Amino acid sequence: MRLEKNNNKGFTLVELIVALAVMSLLMIAVVGLMIMNTATNKRLKADSNVQSEAGELYDHINDAVMQASKIEITADGTTYSNLDKSNPASFAMMTNAAGYNFEKMVIEYAVNYNPAYGGGATVDKDICTVTFELSGDKMYVYRSYGLMTKLNDTPGIIDDNIYAQDITSAVVKVYEDSNAMELLINYNKQERTYTQDNYIKVRNSYVIKHQK
């Protein structure tokens, strides 16, 4: 009986080098794909976060402006309101088509009165004053009430009042003829940019139009 010779010599050095090279390329590709996916997820999360913040801020501003009984806007160092048309601080003087750099907006509107929150009055309505104030890259929002003082926020530029951040610029425009305002806010979060253009019409016609 003839025995066949076992010719199993294993891998040669060249074959091992080739195999290691192929494995290295595969590992590099897998790591690269993981890094790319991680970066994509971070960008998507940043997009989602900034759009969520922008949406919440828009809803808050929209609700306050629409029901406003009084609005004051501070932009480029001047506080504007519905004064006499000839007054340099009247909304009627905001004629720059490019808008003005937003700094602060104070809005008053009526709310249902609840004596449980202070005041002890026998009235149906209270006045809420809400302030939107831009400082650095953050928008601060705080409220105060004429009667329901237990609901008052601590006013000013404090962490508790931060409502949105990562803001790079905010431009305000007032359209007196149409009784509306526009607030254009630009965001940049983790190198992801987002722009929100808020055009809001005020229900009460006397709020933006000049007094006489």
Image: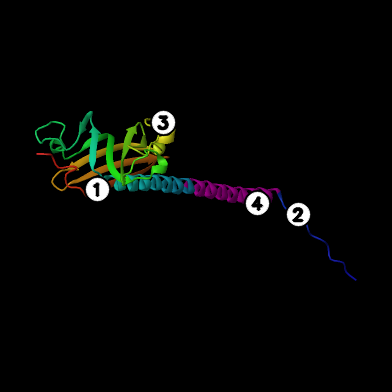
Residue at which label 2 appears: 10
Question: Which mark, by number, is residue 19?
Answer: 4
CA distance for labels 3 and 4 = 61 Å
Query: Where are the magenta residues, as a range?
Result: 13-39
Which residue is the site of mark 1? 199
In-image side of 197 versus 86 (left or right): right
For label 2, the SS is loop
Q: Indicate the amino acid at tag 1.
A: Tyr
Q: Earlier in the sequence, mark 2 or mark 1?
A: 2
Task: Say which label, 2 or 4, has the lower sequence index.
Answer: 2
> Gap between marks 1 and 3, in whole Å?
28 Å
- Give the quadrant of the N terminus: bottom right
Q: Is residue 171 left or right of residue 29?
A: left
Foreground residue, 180 or 150?
Answer: 150
- Give the number of the mark in front: 1 or 3: 3
Few, some or many residues within 10 Å of mark 4 (<14, 14–19, 20+): few
Say what amino acid the circle numbered 4 marks: Ala
Residue at 26%, 47% (x, y): give it. Answer: 67
As drawn, the label of residue 158 is: 3
Contact between marks 2 and 1 (CB within 8 A): the answer is no
Q: Amino acid at mark 3?
A: Ile
SS class, disc 1? strand
Horizontal arrangement in the rendering, residue 176 relative to residue 49 (left or right): left
In magenta stretch: residue 28: yes
Which secondary structure, mark 4? helix
Find out whether the residues at labels 2 and 4 contact each other: C-beta distance under 8 Å. Answer: no
